[in-house]
Image (tube, rainbow, N blue to C red):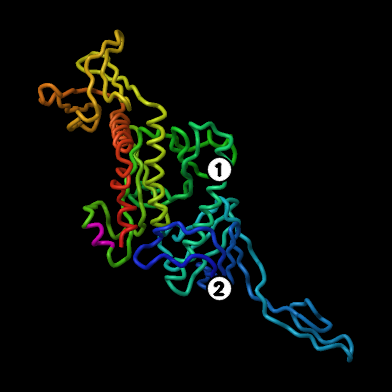
Amino acid sequence: MSTQGPPPAPRGRPGCLLVPARTKTAVALLYDEESENAYDVRLKLTKEVLTIQKQDVICVGGSHQGRNAPSSPSSPIAKDPRYEKRWLDTLSVPLSMARISRYKAGAEKLRWNAFEVLALDGVSSGILRFYTAQEGADWLRAVSANIRELTLQNMKMANKCCSPSNQVVHMGWVNEKLQGADSSQTFRPKFLALKGPSFYVFSTPPVSTFDWVRAERTYHLCEVLFKVHKFWLTEDCWLQANLYLGLQDFDFEDQRPYCFSVVASHGKSHVFNVELGSELAVWEKSFQRATFMEVQRTGSRTYMCSWQGEVLCFTVDFALGFTCFESKTKNVLWRFKFSQLKGSSDDGKTRVKLLFQNLDTKQIETKELEFQDLTAVLHCIHSFIAAKVASVDPGFMDSQSLARKYMFSS
């Protein structure tokens, strides 16, 4: 086996870096889950293609050169044929917009030391099983890195056709957790994208400008909340990490690490899983960056609300903070800076209480409002405050990152 490129990531910090594109070769097993048979294949990874090679016997000399099986000479003076075992290309899997799966479809069972690569057109590498966990992890990172490099190229091409306010910040494959009627759980592949003001959920990647209007779901970035659910450092310290971080929403029956959720308007939630911890960290950072850019671009968002039968307008402004004014007269009822917000509470449905500190009296003033989509408003407030803090303290986002904080530390 020969390998070119950077050394593998240190043990105990799985996938903490997206290694650059590289070339690798190795002998692995191609496994058939139905027959449970496996045989050696040779893998050849380049920047754009994963090639599967099978060993065959070919004639390299004599009168039958090139044939795959020996036969009797056609004449007494014919030279005896010579045969060699060689690796021959049998399948090539393009890596552009390809995805990787380590899980058995339907059963949701993790394939240890094994994964499958599926091309955009559906061509599969088959289940590739490696002889050691370290080798399997190295190949998983290497193939993922090459797919990531090609995805970045596709993003750059797409951004050439988009305005500065509608650029693609990040995109890639994930698995979405679906809840069945019988409480069973299953995951389906989805393609996510952060582009301009929106967060997109696709069943297949957008390969043309027309595909962007065919998303299954589209949400405004300022109105969604990104949350890391779980990730694995190593098997032996997974429980310790959860207890230390206070993550109580995990269970051992759910075998998928590297999960995150996106909570959108009206409380609708999507739970996603990625294959590597480095991918989880990139998604977290990308959501923060895309939301920050959108807040700065829009500057403010206004929502219709009401209180005690009166129709009001509530504005969250990056420069001014919070403003409430009458819908008809535009008369400003009150205005507070972001720094004056000291707390909030809500009924989980439509009503929220915002607690502001009066700068003159130092007393707390409570403002109660009712919104049709309370979740969107609360997420918008969170997005604007986070962007405001980040504009003053560039290290704020990094300090808030669970995934990157614990995956980049030893």
Residue in the picture at 29% in, 8% down:
329
| The C terminus, quarter of image | bottom left
Q: Which mark is residue 156?
A: 1
Counting from the top left corner in percent of width and height, residue 228 is at 32, 48
Of the pair 259 and 143, the residue shown nearer to us: 143
Q: Is residue 104 above or below residue 120?
A: below
Counting from the top left corner in percent of width and height, residue 53 is at 62, 69
Of the pair 69 and 139, the residue shown nearer to us: 139
Side (left or right) of 225 relative to 151:
left
| The N terminus, quarter of image | bottom right
Kind of residue at disc 2: Ser
Precedes in sequence: disc 2 or disc 1: 2
Counting from the top left corner in percent of width and height, residue 25 is at 57, 70
Residue in the picture at 56% in, 37% down:
211
Q: Is residue 183 above or below residue 4?
A: above
Query: Majority secondary structure of the magenta segment?
Result: helix
Residue for badge 2: 2
Kind of residue at disc 1: Lys
Please give the range of residues in magenta: 238-243
Counting from the top left corner in percent of width and height, residue 22 is at 55, 62
Q: Residues within 10 Å of mark 1 (few under 14, many from 20)?
A: some
